Amino acid sequence: MKNILYIVWSDNNKIGIPIIDEQHRGIISTINSLHYFIQTGHGHEIIKPTMIMLEQYTYVHFKTEEALMAEASYPAFEEHIVLHKALLKKTKDLSIDANRNKDSDMVLKFLKEWWLGHINKEDKKYTPFLRKLIDTKAF
């Protein structure tokens, strides 16, 4: 087996909001699990349940982010929601395509690029607003 982990989580991926960081790690873990099964020749068996799980987990994660952003009065809230909707749609579309075409490598590539890009670019934009909210509350 070439590499067990497709995405190696590092402190650079943390945004500093514990619940969000844990959810991000969960998403990355799911992507790594899909990679593992692809590497062992069982990607075709696991892609459908993995994509369903990823869609559902992503939905919960986005609801968490959106609730915190709304409470923190994040000024780019609406723009961030547009990004969330686009990712959910793309994930759903990829899930359908991957199940039909069995192209799990395409799914992995998209998930890695999108999630790491989203976490390290877009999510870090709201971090100061959430940090201020969390510092004033006892979460």
Image (cartoon, rainbow, N blue to C red):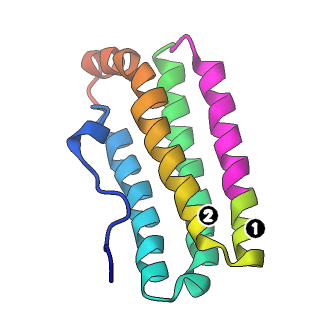
Q: Is residue 6 left or right of residue 79?
A: left
Q: Residue furthest front?
A: 2
Which residue in the structure is indicated by mark 2?
106
Q: Is residue 17 placed above or below 47 in the rendered structure?
A: above
Q: Mark number for residue 73?
A: none
Is 78 part of what is drawn in magenta? yes
Is 76 part of what is drawn in magenta? yes
**Quadrant position of the C terminus in the picture:** top left
Task: Locate residue 105: give its quadrant.
Answer: bottom right
Q: Position of residue 90 (x, y in %)?
A: 70, 50
Q: Main secondary structure of the magenta part?
A: helix
Q: Is residue 57 visible?
A: no
Residue beneath the point at 33% across and 48% down: 22
Q: Earlier in the sequence, mark 1 or mark 2?
A: 1
**Quadrant position of the N terminus in the picture:** bottom left
Q: Mark number for residue 97?
A: 1
Query: Do residues under tags 1 and 2 come within 8 Å of each other at their CB atoms?
Result: yes
Nearer the camera: disc 1 or disc 2? 2
Q: Position of residue 13 (x, y in %)?
A: 31, 40
Q: Is residue 84 left or right of residue 16?
A: right
Residue beneath the point at 49% across and 34% down: 65
